[in-house]
Structure formats: C-alpha cells, structure tokens
Image (cartoon, rainbow, N blue to C red):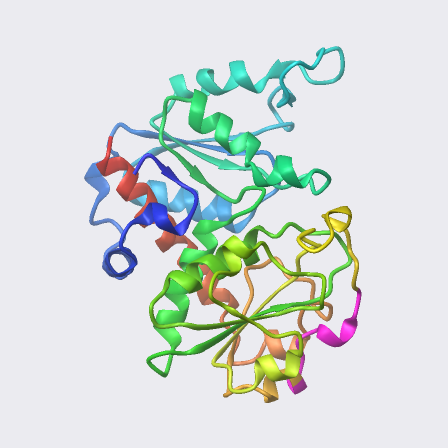
C-alpha cells in the first residue's frame, strides 16, 4: 500500500477488519516490521487523538517517530506555485517535501480544508504534493476532505458494539459555532457504505448535502426524528456547508438550528442507540452532557480504536516497503 486516503486503498474490508482485531489482541505482534524504520508525522493543524494514536501505533510496530509541527517550530511553508515569496513564508513545500522524505520511510500528513476554495480543497492539493514529491508512502491523518483513520476506527467500534447483524447507523449533522470541514462525515459515509452489513442514513438540514461520491447509496432523510427512529448507532458531527447545491455557500455556516443538538429526547427515538462522535466535541452544542456521559456513549472506546486502525495502515505500508 503506497498511499492511504480512501476506503478502497485498504483492500478487502473483511480482511482489514480481521487484521484490526488480530492487532487489538496483540498490539506488539509485528514489532519486527518497523525495526530501524522511521515515521514522519507532519501537522499543518492541531491534533490530540491523531497525534497520540498514530505515534503509539508506530511505536507498537517498532518504529522511530519524528513529529513536525508546521508553523510551530519549523519554517512557514508556501504551498502555491508561482507565488513571489516576499511574505512571512520562508520555504516552499516543493523543496521541503523531498527533504522530509530523505529522513524517513513513511509519511503521515494532516492538513485541513481552507473552506474558501472548494476546487482547491477537494483536489487535495497539499496531500497530493506529498504523494508526488516525497518519494515515500503517504497516509492521511485527516485532509481537506477525508479522515480515513477515524472512519476505520468508527467501523471497528460499531463491529464491537453492534447487537444485530445489520445495524442502522445514522450520521446526523449538529450545530456548531465555527465553520468545520466535511472530512469526518465524508469518510464516515464512505466507510459505512463500503461495509456490507451497515444500514446507513444521513440526516441534515436542507442545503447541507455532502458530495455524492461520499454519500453513495446512503439514504438521506431531512427529518431528524424520522432518521433516528430505530437507530442502533447515532454518529453526531457538524460540518460547514459543502457547497453542493450552492457553490457560493461552500465553507459557510448557513444553519444554526439548535434543535439538531443530540439530547436525551433525540436518543429516546432510537433503538437504545449508542452515541458516537470523533472528538473533540462542543458539549451542549453538538451533544448534551447527559448523552455523552451516558452508558451508551462510545466516544472513549471509539477514540481508543484510533490506535488500532492506524496500526493496520502502518503495518500494511511497512510490509510493502
């Protein structure tokens, strides 16, 4: 596996899931694969779970780890070609990337959407430059449009906690005070569509439609109560307007309806459903205290599974070196 961005990159999903549970039972089984190998983790944006889980996964596999925070301890990097670099950015990504590749065997990149230019974001401009110029296998630690390590961990969590063979899983929009990317909901929808035994429903206000290539065969329901009825898992996440129905709205907050906040009443519509969120979460905006603190909340086991999803990805990349 030379790159990991979308669910197709992981190969047969049943084999990847089996591998995930194998690694969860013995996290150090493949330590020999990473001996004398180095992972470089490059962060253009803040991180807690991704930083910790990816570093732990690499260490479990015997790797050395270098963490680089761009714009905090490194030169500010220019990402555009043709720019006269007479501002505050001292180095161009096109020189920095191959230099980084000299010092490592694998590269993980985290770079969020700018939310001003949909074409630029959805082309994955920054990530694709790493793939093209680093000379190393590259995996996404969240990008402008996807967060596959999170979605893989979500699927592992659902498999662990499901009580029926084909659970109803609902991805619900929830309000937020800031404009957020669509990366998490995009990947969640993509991975749930790829899973053979998931009944996926997506609910959100009109105008917040995700890109069709991620929605896939999921059912879209604009009535949140109808969507929640009989659900086994509720996955709450905010996203800014994807600009699918109106490009001028891309990256904007065009709805602030607090009735979409997941509370006890919302959860009462479900089939004793489990609550999920990728974290960090704005309490009493995305979800109320009583829901996230309830026995049906899976946010901590879900976060713990980030170590497992990342271990599978890094293992596959090490095996391909």
Question: Considering the image in quadrants, where does the N terminus appear?
Answer: top left
Q: Is residue 220 above or below residue 272?
A: above
Residue in the picture at 52% in, 45% down: 142
Q: Does 247 appear in magenta?
A: no
Residue in the picture at 75% in, 10% down: 86
Of residue 321 and residue 288, the one placed in the foreground of this image is 321
Quarter of the image for residue 313 reads top left
Q: Is residue 85 above or below residue 268?
A: above
Question: Considering the image in quadrants, where does the C terminus appear?
Answer: top left
Residue in the picture at 65% in, 78% down: 224
Tell me the magenta residue range: 256-265
**Left or right, residue 308 beside residue 264:** left
Report the label total.
0
**Left or right, residue 51 beside residue 65:** right
Query: Can you give x and y, in whole percent of width and height, for residue 176 in the image?
Result: 74, 61
Query: Can you give x and y, in whole percent of width and height, for residue 149 in the image?
Result: 44, 50
**Left or right, residue 315 beside residue 235:** left
Q: Does 261 appear in magenta?
A: yes
Query: Can you give x and y, in whole percent of width and height, for residue 281 in the image?
Result: 64, 61
Q: Is residue 168 above or below residue 74?
A: below
Q: Is residue 185 above or below residue 263?
A: above
**Left or right, residue 179 beside residue 33:** right
Quarter of the image for residue 119 reads top right
Query: Can you give x and y, in whole percent of width and height, for residue 299 in the image?
Result: 52, 67
């Amino acid at each position: 596996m030379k790159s990991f961005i979308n669910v197709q990159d992981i190969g047969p999903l049943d084999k990847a899931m089996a591998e995930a549970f194998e690694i969860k039972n013995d996290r150090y089984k493949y330590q020999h694969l990473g001996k004398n190998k180095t992972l470089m983790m490059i962060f253009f944006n803040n991180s807690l779970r991704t930083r910790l889980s990816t570093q732990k996964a690499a260490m479990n596999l015997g790797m050395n780890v270098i963490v680089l925070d761009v714009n905090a301890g490194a030169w500010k990097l220019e990402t555009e070609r043709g720019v006269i670099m007479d501002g505050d950015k001292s180095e161009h990504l096109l020189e920095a990337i191959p230099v980084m590749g000299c010092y490592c065997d694998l590269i993980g990149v985290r770079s969020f959407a700018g939310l001003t230019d949909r074409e630029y974001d959805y082309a994955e401009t920054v990530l694709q430059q790493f793939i093209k110029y680093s000379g190393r296998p590259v995996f996404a630690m969240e990008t402008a449009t996807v967060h596959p390590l999170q979605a893989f961990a979500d699927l592992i969590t659902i498999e662990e906690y499901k009580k029926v063979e084909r659970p109803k899983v609902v991805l619900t929009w929830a309000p937020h005070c800031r404009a957020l990317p669509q990366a998490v909901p995009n990947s969640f929808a993509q991975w749930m569509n790829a899973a053979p035994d998931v009944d996926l429903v997506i609910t959100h206000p009109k105008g917040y439609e995700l890109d069709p290539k991620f929605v896939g065969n999921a059912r879209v329901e604009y009535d949140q109560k109808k969507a929640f009825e009989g659900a086994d898992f509720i996955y709450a996440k905010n996203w800014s307007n994807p600009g699918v129905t109106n490009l001028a709205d891309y990256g904007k907050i065009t709805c602030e309806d607090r009735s979409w906040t997941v509370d006890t009443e919302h959860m009462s519509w479900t089939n004793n459903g489990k609550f999920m969120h990728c974290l960090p979460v704005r309490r009493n905006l995305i979800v109320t205290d009583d829901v996230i603190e309830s026995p049906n909340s899976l946010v901590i086991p879900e976060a713990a599974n980030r170590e497992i999803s990342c271990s599978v990805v890094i293992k596959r990349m090490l095996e391909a070196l």
